[in-house]
Image (tube, helix red, strand yellow):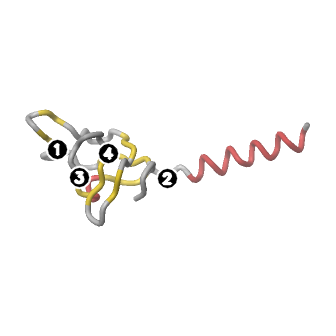
Amino acid sequence: MKVGQKVVCINDETGWLDGEKKLVKGEIYTVLWVSEKDVQVIPNDAGWDKSRFRPIDTEWAEEVLRKIAESELVCV
């Protein structure tokens, strides 16, 4: 995982801090900082174990957009 990457929460059990539910399973978060074991996805919040999240693969969408842009340049 890296800063700026989109991740989805896959485990929100005991995802509570200060009596408030912080993590939501299925919610998409942006990585704010990463350590060897933890990742921060909520500003001013403690880090959560990386195993609670799965990276979202956006490479396929970027490739599609790149191909569209290239085909539009050829057609002009």
Mark 2 vs 3: CB contact within 8 A: no
The amino acid sitting under disc 3 is Trp
The residue that label 2 is drawn on is 57
Q: Quadrant of the C terminus?
A: top right
User: Can you tell which mark lies on residue 15?
Assistant: 1
Q: Quadrant of residue 73?
A: top right
Name which of mark 4 and mark 2 comes first in the sequence. Answer: 4
Q: Residue at x 23, y 41 (%)?
A: 23
What secondary structure is marked by label 4? Answer: loop
Label 3 and label 1: CA atoms lie apart by 9 Å
Q: Residue at x 8, y 34 (%)?
A: 19
> How many C-alpha atoms fall within 10 Å of the one at disc 2: few (<14), some, or many (≥20)?
few
Position of residue 62 measured from the top left corner of the image (x, y, whole percent): 62, 48
Q: Are marks 3 and 1 in contact (CB under 8 Å)?
A: yes
Residue at the disc numbered 4? 41
Position of the N terminus by quadrant:
bottom left
